[in-house]
Amino acid sequence: MSEITGLPLRRAKASTRLEIVLLIPLLTMSMMAPRQKTSPAYQVKAVFLFNFTQFVEWPASAFPEAQAPLVIGILGTDPFGNYLDNTVEGEKINGRPITVQRYENVEQAKACHILFVNVAQTNQLQKVLTGLKGHGILTVGENNGFIRQGGIVRFLEENNKIRLQINQEAAREADLTISSKLLRLAEIVSAK
Amino acid sequence: MTVILLTSGAVLLLTCVSFFAYEFFTFRHTTVRQLSTLGEIIAANSTAALAFDSPEDAKEILAALKAEKHIIAAGLYDEKGNLFSHYPSDMPASNLPGTPEQDGYRFHQAHLIVFQPVKQGAKRLGSLYLISDMGAMRERFQLYAFIVVLVIALSFVLAFILSRNLQRSVSQPILALAETARAISERRDYAVRATRTGDDELGDLTDAFNQMLTQIQEQNLALSQHKERLENIVESMGDAYVSFNKHWEYTFVNNKALGLMGKQKDELVGKTLWEAFPDTKGTTFDTEYHRVLEERIPRSFEIHYSSYAMWLEVRAYPHEDGIAVFYTDISKYRKAEEEIRSFNQNLEQKVLERTNELKAANEELESFSYSVSHDLRAPLRSVHGYMKIFAEDYAEKMDGEAQRIMNIIIENAKKMGQLIDDLLEFSKLGRRELMKANIPMQDIVNVIWEEQRKMEVGRQIEFCLHDLPSAYADSVTIKQVWMNLISNAIKYTLGKEKSAIEIGAQERESEIIYFVKDNGAGFDMRYYDKLFGVFQRLHKATEFEGTGVGLAIAHRIISKHGGRIWANAQPNKGATFYFSLSKSNEK
């Protein structure tokens, strides 16, 4: 009998959980009709950048304090306009707010947790990635040699879809834990 | 037997239904839990696929559901509610709900539908839809139903066998007993007895039943004896008795009543009062009988029943079923009463007439005697006057003999005058009104005594006066009484060497008795009845002078006061005169 009466309890719990669910930016692009000229591909990438916050764990040392914001940084040309800012606005991850920062040099970028590196020249990229090594930063880029030069996640387009490449070793070196669920989706590649 | 089968059937059915209900709820609950758990696992695995827009991965994850045969379909929806991926992949997407419903589960046509949130951490990424076939439950319940039917069938067979055995040992004797009871109540023959079959409780029941029959028989006998006795009493009663039921039908009529009404029993019993005596409708009989029946109170009344020319005294009492009525023929008493009444009326009339006649005669007599005595006085005075003149003028011319005769004439004329005066006094008393007041007897008697005493110079009279209570009376006439009695006492003690007169009184409850006692001549009690008569004398005029009116006057005065006067005497030993006056204070 007690099992029968237990049923509605479970249901109540489920609905409570539902109420907790926050309004979040959407996965697909159609809603986010850009006011500025952000291409659909970059809209998806902006959402992916945000979604990384949910599937990657940073070491505690990556944050100056418990409530310190999680920072998504952009180094180089910003292809997102303010789409990324809109996406993360009001969002929280483990109680931390999420902010977007734009950097001009590597030194500035060391304070962030996810960094989208949009640098075209190979030697310059090499320099950036070397400079960020070991700072607990999830580096994301699009260049062909991004992974080879020490980057962690690379976006690549295939059949009009955005695919992911992940360098697990680089992630481990950066002291980041990437969820196996994310790893399963991505193509695991190595720098060698 | 049917009862036993029904009972066991009901018990079984109830048990099975309870079992079914329990199983149903438990099974459902378990299914829901299992499906929720499965949903949670799938949802947890699908987060990355949703987050990074990988329907292929989602499809792969959902394909794992193949292991769960009861899952018919599954669908993954993105945050916007669009279908992102579904299972089985070869099923058209239109078979799935277009948008996800609220989180939770529901049963729909033997299917369980679950909507599960897909979350990564606190972040909601979409919804998972699962639909499960409840076929397993149906299969299980079919098995249960089969078992239940089997069990019930077996139980019925068992119950039937058991109850047949039970009937042989229990029901049959009871049925036999019931049969006997029915036979008895139909034939009303309480002499029948049930036969005892066994040495068990049923045997005891049979004994108890037989005992009850014996008691009924005894009570019936007592009742019929009682009824007979009552009927005898009713028959032997002097009164006519009839009984009606609520519909006014005669239920009983005793012989006396039949005699009174001059009818046969079969003319009345079973008929209503109104059929037998239509002329009683609307009469006192009708109204009174209805009151008795409706108000349940006894009524009695007297009535003249003209059809029988008879006066009846009727007493009606309510009884359980109607009313009981007693009739007494009171015509004789009525007649006698009537006669006595008319006789009394005549008598009163006659007495009144006579009294008036008597009164007239009396008045006539009194006025006659008054006028006679009054008219006699004038010529007598004339005779007496002229005789005295004659004696004075012609005394020397007459010889001694002539003078003696003349003196006798004068003396008798004087005496006659006295007689007439007394007679007038007496007759005046009859007209006189009494003026009653409180009068001091002691003083009155003292004054009278002194007056009388003065006239008797030289006599030795011993006078004793006791205390006299005062009386409420007419002082003038009472003085007359005392005067007459005291002067009598003085007169009749004249011959004695030593006269003794005693006056006193005795107080009684309602009256005072005064007396005057002397030691004089007394009288013979043989002549007592003449004592208070007018002109009646017990002594010769030569012995004691007097007119014989004094006591008559006293008698008359005391009578007028409502008192009595009487005397006690012996010749030569004195006399005592008593009179009484009432103590009444009325003024």
Image (cartoon, coloured by chain):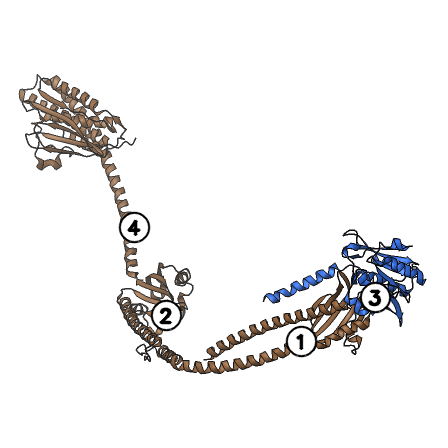
Chain colours: A blue, B brown
Look at the image and tell me whether residue B261 can be seen: yes
Disc 4 packing (10 Å; few <14; some 14–19; many ≥20) = few
Q: Is residue B457 above or below residue B169?
A: above
How far apart in space, not on screen, are marks 1 and 4 (Cα)?
A: 119 Å
User: On the rendered image, what quadrant is the N terminus of chain A found in?
Assistant: bottom right
Q: Amino acid at mark 2?
A: Tyr
Whichever of labels 4 and 2 marks the residue nearer the N terminus, that label is: 2
- Between the C-alphas of marks 2 and 3, the distance is 126 Å
Query: Residue tagged by mark 2?
Result: B250
The residue mark sitting in front, 3 or 1, is: 3
CA–CA distance in space, label 4 to label 2: 44 Å
When asked about the image quadrant of residue A145, the answer is: bottom right
Q: Nearer the viewer, residue A88 or B518?
A: A88
Disc 4 to disc 3, C-alpha distance: 156 Å
| Residue type (three-letter) at the residue carrying disc 3 | Asn
**Which residue is under mark 1?**
B134
Task: State left or right for residue B489 relative to residue A83.
Answer: left
Can residue A118 be seen by looking at this rendering?
Answer: no
Residue B510 image position (x, y, % from top left)? 23, 34
Location of mark 4 (residue): B345
The subunit letter for the residue under badge 1 reads B
- Real-space Cα separation, disc 1 to disc 2, in angstroms: 83 Å
Q: Which mark is residue A167?
A: 3
Mark 4 and mark 1 in contact (Cβ < 8 Å)? no
In this rendering, which labeled residue sits more in front, label 2 or label 3? 3
> Please, what secondary structure does the residue beneath circle 1 have?
loop
Please state, as top left, top right, bottom left or bottom right, where the C terminus of chain A lies in the image. bottom right
x and y percentages locating residue B317 in the rendered image: 35, 62
Foreground: disc 1 or disc 2: 1
**Could you tell whether B231 is left or right of A78 in the image?**
left
Residue drawn at x 34%, y 61% is: B314
**Marked residue chain, label 3:** A
